Image (tube, helix red, strand yellow):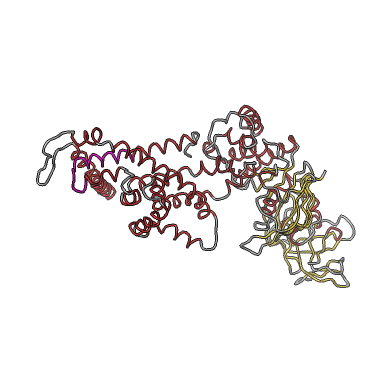
């Protein structure tokens, strides 16, 4: 039957994709536990935990880099929310002159080459005295993340429309009550989507943090990079694994926090 | 007592040249008031203007002797039931019903007690903990009605709340709303395009067309004396003819039918069904005859489409009355001149 053959083909494609996705992760884990693993050896030259010892016991930057990466990600989300929420509302639910141009301008930071933006930003921040500061790095992180937050939220606003707002108004809810009890819970899926992208993009910034932070703000990518680019690959892999774990944890924490804020949120079955 | 006054109201949609104008509309306390008209006539816009969801360009809205023209929707102490139930999907039923009390600062115990009573009133006791998605469309609309009544609003606005429901359910809901209105002594303004709704529910009704109020009155009064051709057409009258006044009476266009009575400026005549009879039972009747072209059964009546002196005439008769008639038969009809109506437009 054609259906069966198609099914088998789809399974094969899926398996290849999973392998494609899993191979680097598995390699990374194995490398982090080995002294050396180079071509043409099929297996690494021995198993040890030296890299992990270094990451967690010797390098004191590890813990602070985890903290600072998380802190930057959360501050970035906060600013994104404050700026992006009203902007997304305007783009999602209202029509105005120049809307298409505005949408294009907002997408610019993800369209233009990041290095061009960062170099320009660096000069400006130097003049403003924002380099080598946490605030500077957070602001620099807002630029590549805000477009994603606005896009996620504005599609949420668009499908929400005005009818729920109108209904809540007619039941006596003030503007803030409407945002709190109606708009925000309804936008929760969009908020989670936008915030997840913010976390991932913010946490993986390297050049931005290095340039704007001037080497003083050490996030995981900043600490990790020297090991990957020629230093100790085992340690680099250990950091890589640590980074993935932290990113997953951040996503989980944010999901839990947002859902707890609106604990009664139930999916419509 | 007059509860709501609209005076010299004028409003327009930015994107179109549609204008809604209401010179004067007074709504009494405890009145069940209907706004009726074709879709796009402006009845929903008028309702939203009363509720504060649509801004006014000119005019004044007075509620209880207080000018509320510039009062925000959420401060007008009205409520609205829309075509969709619009229950908040992330709240369970009791929280949905209690929402108007929550935003007014009631304690949990206070609002839940009232919400349970309100749910009982609409026949949904025990549904507290369910979520909107677990309810049928009719049940959801009942919850929506309970929610709109719980904070004892001055006026409840309803925008075609039953038009998405099955006919049987619709009938049930109409009676529910009518009973609630009588039990709770509330004022309701109700938008619909369905005539049967008007007849069942409304104390008074305003017929709206093209952004203008054409006629205000009791549904039965409008039925007896429609103010214009448009109103008559909307109320389902069939036999409307153009024609001219002559010294001998009103002459119907493209027909040899002549009505012995006329008003000098008339250009149109309406012959309602109660002006037609097959027996000569009084004086002052015009006798005419026609051929039956069609015969249908409508709502327990027999509907005949006749050809009478070159023009079509609709005639309804109750079943099992006189001798049976068939397509092709000729029929003799008498027109009661005192029951026909002339129009100038």
Pick the residue in front: A255 or A60: A60
The residue closer to the viewer here, A176 or B11, is: A176
Magenta includes A231? yes
Query: Which residue is at a point 21% across and 40% down the rendered structure image?
Result: A235
**Residue at (48, 60) in percent of width and height:** A102
Residue B56 to residue A215: above or below: below
Estimate the x, y position of residue A13 in percent, counting from the top left. 25, 48
Q: Is residue B321 left or right of residue B17?
A: right
x%, y% of residue A50?
18, 34
B136 in relation to B198, above or below: above
Magenta stretch: give its range: A228-246
Residue B82 horizontal side relative to residue A75, left or right: right
A234 or A11: nearer the eye? Answer: A234
Q: Looking at the magenta stretch, what is its main secondary structure?
A: helix
**Horizontal relation, residue B105 to residue B64: left or right:** left
Residue B77, magenta (yes or no): no
Residue B291: x and y in percent read: 73, 63
Q: Is residue B299 visible?
A: no
Q: Quadrant of residue B109?
A: top right
> In the image shown, does B191 or B73 lie closer to the viewer?
B73
Residue located farthest toward the right when viewing the structure as drawn: B283
Q: Is residue A116 left or right of residue B216?
A: left
Instruction: State the image coordinates of residue B158 (x, y, percent, origin top left).
Output: 67, 46
Q: Quadrant of residue B38?
A: bottom right
Residue B333 appearing in the image: yes
Q: Residue furthest left?
A: A40
Query: In the rendered image of this protein, does residue A12 appear above or below residue B268?
Result: above
């Amino acid at each position: 039957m054609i259906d069966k053959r198609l099914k088998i083909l789809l399974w094969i494609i899926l398996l290849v994709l999973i392998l494609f996705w899993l191979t680097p992760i598995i390699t990374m884990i194995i490398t982090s536990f080995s002294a050396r693993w180079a071509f043409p050896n099929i297996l690494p030259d021995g198993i040890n935990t030296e890299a992990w010892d270094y990451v967690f016991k010797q390098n004191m930057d590890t813990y602070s880099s985890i903290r600072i990466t998380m802190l930057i990600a959360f501050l970035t989300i906060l600013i994104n929310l404050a700026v992006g929420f009203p902007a997304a509302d305007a783009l999602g639910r209202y029509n105005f002159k120049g809307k298409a141009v505005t949408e294009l301008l907002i997408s610019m930071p993800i369209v233009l080459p990041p290095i061009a933006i960062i170099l320009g930003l660096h000069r400006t921040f130097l003049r403003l005295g924002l380099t080598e500061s946490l605030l500077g790095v957070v602001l620099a992180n807002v630029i590549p993340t805000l477009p994603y937050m606005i896009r996620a939220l504005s599609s949420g606003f668009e499908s929400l429309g005005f009818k729920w707002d109108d209904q809540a108004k007619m039941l006596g809810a003030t503007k803030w009550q409407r945002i709190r009890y109606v708009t925000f819970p309804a936008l929760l899926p969009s908020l989670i989507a936008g915030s997840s992208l913010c976390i991932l993009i913010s946490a993986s910034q390297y050049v931005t943090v290095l340039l704007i932070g001037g080497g003083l703000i050490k996030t995981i990518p900043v600490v990790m990079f020297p090991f990957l680019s020629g230093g100790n690959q085992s340690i680099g892999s250990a950091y890589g694994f640590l980074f993935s774990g932290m990113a997953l944890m951040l996503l989980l924490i944010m999901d839990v926090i947002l859902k707890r804020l609106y604990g009664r949120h139930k999916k419509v079955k | 007592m007059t509860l709501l006054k609209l005076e010299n109201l004028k409003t327009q949609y930015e994107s179109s040249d549609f204008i809604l104008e209401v010179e004067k509309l007074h709504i009494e306390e405890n009145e069940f008031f209907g706004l009726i008209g074709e879709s796009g006539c402006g009845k929903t816009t008028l309702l939203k203007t009363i509720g504060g969801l649509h801004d006014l360009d000119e005019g004044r809205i007075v509620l209880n002797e207080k000018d509320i023209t510039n009062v925000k929707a959420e401060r007008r102490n009205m409520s609205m039931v829309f075509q969709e139930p619009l229950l908040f999907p992330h709240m369970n039923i009791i929280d949905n019903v209690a929402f108007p009390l929550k935003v007014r600062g009631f304690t949990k115990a206070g609002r839940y007690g009232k919400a349970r009573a309100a749910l009982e009133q609409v026949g949904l006791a025990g549904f507290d903990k369910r979520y909107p998605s677990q309810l049928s469309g009719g049940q959801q609309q009942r919850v929506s009605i309970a929610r709109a009544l719980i904070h004892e609003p001055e006026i409840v606005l309803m925008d075609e709340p039953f038009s998405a429901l099955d006919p049987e359910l619709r009938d049930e809901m109409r009676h529910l709303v009518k009973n609630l209105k009588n039990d709770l002594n509330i004022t309701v303004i109700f938008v619909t395009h369905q005539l049967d709704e008007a007849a069942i529910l409304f104390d008074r009704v305003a017929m709206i067309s093209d952004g203008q109020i054409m006629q205000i009155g009791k549904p039965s009064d409008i039925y007896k004396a429609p103010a214009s051709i448009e109103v008559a057409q909307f109320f389902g009258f069939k036999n409307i003819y153009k024609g001219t006044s002559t010294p001998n009476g009103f002459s119907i266009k493209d027909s040899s039918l002549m009505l012995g009575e006329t008003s000098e400026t008339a250009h149109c005549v309406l012959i309602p069904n109660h002006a037609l009879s097959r027996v000569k039972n009084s004086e002052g009747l015009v006798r005419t005859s026609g051929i039956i072209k069609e015969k249908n059964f409508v709502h327990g009546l027999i509907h005949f489409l006749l050809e009478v002196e070159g023009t079509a005439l609709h005639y309804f008769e109750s079943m099992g009355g006189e001798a049976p008639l068939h397509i092709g038969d000729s029929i003799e009809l008498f027109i009661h001149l005192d029951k026909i109506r002339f129009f100038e437009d």
